[in-house]
Image (tube, rainbow, N blue to C red):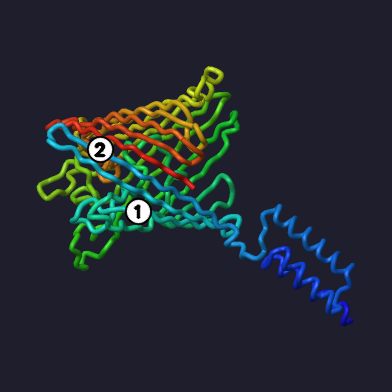
Amino acid sequence: MRKKIGVIMAMFLCFLAIYKAEAGEIDLLVNKLVEKGVLNPTEAQILVDETQADVAKQNAQGINTSLPSWVQNLQLKGDARVRYQWQKKDTDSTSRNRGRVRFRLGLADQINSKWLMEAGMATGESRSSNLTGNDPRSTNASFLNFFERPEIRLDYADIKYKPNSNFSLVAGKFVPTDYLYKTSELVWDDDINPAGASLAYVHPTGIGDSDVFFNTGAWVLDEYRNKGIVSSDNTNAFGQWLQYGQLGLKGTHGKFDGKVAGTYYNFNKFKGHNLDFSGGGNTKDGSSNLVYDYDAVGASGELGVANLFGGLPFHIDERIGIFGDYIRNISALVPAKNRDGFQVGMIVGSKTVSEKKSWNFRYMYARLKSDAFPDCFTDSDRYSGATNIWAHKFSVNYAIAKNVILGSNWYQSDTIKGVHNTENLLQADLLVKF
């Protein structure tokens, strides 16, 4: 009986030690057990062989029982970007030269087969001194004030429920990529992470390789407070929301891929109130309050073809695509001449750049009238995020190594109505992703 207990204890110690010690230390432990007479040499060798075989099997399966399952499921991702930016308007006698850095770090934990938790942090800075929050349209930190340390803040934190591959529900502050389809930053800057809840559903059509998809959500723009509560910002006393619905179709056929969707936006309580982080352009009264509401309908679509010419040198035809977005304010009283906007573009090269020597070139033209959409959400680099603008954008990206990317953007933009003052903006980036 004592012999059996000794063997069991030896097996337990070996299995425990295999995750806490190196192979040489495990051999020392087994040798001590042989010296004490707990195991004979044959039993010891059998135990070591079986333990090593079990560990090799678990390593092949990616299992490490020394760590809790929630730690094993934890995934980290992020990027760091260093940017030089040059900016000048025609009427300015001097240009603006800026050094900027961006850092983002995110984690995701698969709680179980249906629930996922995500969180991330990012650099950021206030848009102007009279606003206490950081600009939701930018994660840049500018080089200012003799090496001051920029702040880093919560970028997103959400919980996702995905019972199957067709359905996804998210709540919290989240990255909206999977819940709102768009092809450009015509009305939504890529850095905006909304807060609230969204749902995405995809269903095969049964016709070739195509799916219909539906996205909807309710996003909280500002909190609701009872009017009896004193607030230095009266707009907060009313609560502002956005509800949206989007229906679309996507599919592939041979070398071709395409996607198209229509979207309805219902903005709650915008007329008569002002907007934080306004880029300018919306029609306002003498108190800087909005004159109109901003309920809108939009459309987005893209069409691409891979290796159209059978594979040109330098991957020129790896993918050639055209894309566009359209928006129209459908609220009452908005003048027709101020209602709509669009952006069209093309891409040559890789759809995404990450592998060494992958690259792409994009060109886009945008025209966004003054009241087509709230001016606090649009592309912040395009005429400082204003509406009532037209703009050209050229973009080139090239991966000098895996996940190491050189990029450049050039904007030329101006107002549609009013005093013209053409702005040129150049951005040169070094981006590392991990």
Task: Give the residue displayed 18% in from the left and 63% down from the top.
Answer: 232
Residue that carries the numbered disc 1 in the rendered image: 123
Q: Position of residue 129 (x, y in %)?
A: 19, 55
The residue type indicated by label 1 comes to Thr
Residue farthest along the left direction in this orientation: 286
Contact check, label 2 and label 1, Cβ < 8 Å: no
Image quarter of residue 328: top left
Mark 2 or mark 1: which is in front?
2
- Mark 1: secondary structure: strand
Left-right relation of 403 to 3? left
Q: Position of residue 168 (x, y in %)?
A: 51, 49
Q: Count the marks: how many?
A: 2
Q: Position of residue 400 (x, y in %)?
A: 47, 35
Foreground of the two, 91 or 258 = 91
Left-right relation of 394 to 235? right
What is the distance, in whole Å, between disc 2 and disc 1 at their CAs?
A: 20 Å
Image quarter of residue 262: top left
Task: Give the residue displayed 26% in from the left and 35% down from the top.
Answer: 425
Q: Earlier in the sequence, mark 2 or mark 1?
A: 2
- Mark 2: secondary structure: strand
Q: Position of residue 370 (x, y in %)?
A: 21, 36
Disc on res. 86: 2
| Above or below: residue 426 compared with residue 102 | above
Category of crowding for the residue at label 2, using alpha-carbon neighbours closer than 10 angstroms: few (below 14), some (14–19), many (at least 20): some
